[in-house]
Image: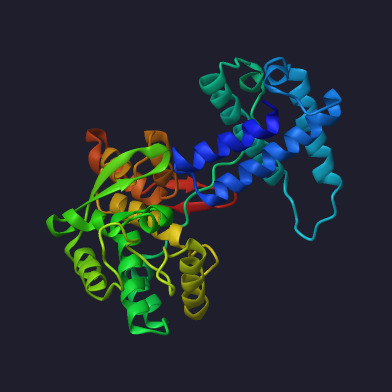
Amino acid sequence: MKAGEAVETWLEWMARERRSSMRTVAAYRHDLGLALGFLTDHLGGEPDLAALGKLKVADLRAWLAHETARTEQKPTRRVVTTDGRARSRARRLSALRSFFRYLAERYGIENPAPQLLAAPKTRKRLPRPLSREDALKAPEDIAALSHTTEGAVRDEALFMLLYGAGLRIGEALDLDCRDLGGAGDGLLRIVGKGGRERIVPLLPAVVTALEAWRRVHPAPSPDAPLFTGVRGGRLQAPVARRAMQTWREQAGLSSSATPHALRHSFATHMLEGGADLRSIQELLGHASLSTTQVYTLADERHLLSVWRSAHPMAGGMPEATVTDGKAGKKI
């Protein structure tokens, strides 16, 4: 089997079994395409599985160096920062490592070279949640921009679900009508990244919005998509993103106000309300607690407030000053 065929098989597996988003699959196809293009020239022909198993760290370093040089020489209107280039390199390395793990599991092709490459250090991107006020009014305001009554009911239910339960946009749009079977009990079964299942509780306001949408759903058979588009098929994520983009532009919000920002808002506002990280981890469906801990980094004020109120030695402590590298911020 040639490497290109193996890549396509892997990408199909990622989409079907791992439930990776279309954006992730497209990014991985692009990155692996670059790698195979370089290796084909580097080795004098498209490699097969046996050749992939014999690649050395030096071969892969040569590819990453080639991509770095190509990116720096490529004319672009965008300003590419050092951190941006490091993120691109890290993503390509992640794609390569995932592909080689698949080769080992599926075809027995063991090659430690991708794991031996040093990953570039990048700055951790902090979540950018909406304010409580904006997050609360987003579903109703977005719904008001719909051109049809049916679309308004659908959009309110969708965005209520994103903020009220912390779902990813892909998770919400993958739901079928049958998945609402337990919604009357205030629970919803979600299949997230990596096929991991979790049960999320639904607030009464979210249940009410979902039931209102189910009553006007054009074809609410059990196997039908829960959220449908104008032609009756499954609603696509770009359509939902455009609806929120229209609202944020009218509301004067930044470009960070996206459907995923509602998930960040859910986690941030839960943390501010006193929820513990383990509970938030379970609700978000994070495989690792370290992924959830980023929300504590994004809210220094809350973190220090909890520290001062919870630690027995902190009684009567004055407010602390946190330095963010540019100026001191009083917390």
Task: Please give left or right for residue 234 compared with residue 177 in the image.
Answer: right
- Can residue 72 be spotted in the picture? yes
- From the viewer's side, name the closer residue of 143 and 256: 143
Question: Residue visible at 32% across and 62% down?
Answer: 226
User: Where in the figure is residue 68, as x and y percent of width and height?
Assistant: 79, 38
Quadrant showing the N terminus: top right
Left or right: 59 as drawn, with respect to 213: right
Picture colour scheme: rainbow
Note whether 96 is above or below 251 in the view shown: above
The answer to which image quadrant residue 166 occupies is bottom left
Kindly tell me whether residue 121 is visible in this rendering. no
The residue that appears at 35% across and 38% down in the rendered structure is 196
Task: Looking at the picture, tell me which residue is in the foreground, 170 or 14.
Answer: 14
**Residue drawn at x 29%, y 52% as measured from the top left:** 270
Residue 307, x across and y down, in percent: 30, 41
Eyeballing the image, is 52 above or below 311?
above
Q: 319 or 192, which is in the foreground?
A: 192
Instruction: Pinpoint residue 133: horizontal percent, then vertical percent.
Output: 34, 70
Identify whether 307 is placed above or below 247: above
Residue in view at x 41 percent, y 41 percent: 193
> How many numbered tags mark residues here?
0
Is 224 on the left-hand or right-hand side of 89? left
**Residue 173 image position (x, y, % from top left):** 39, 58
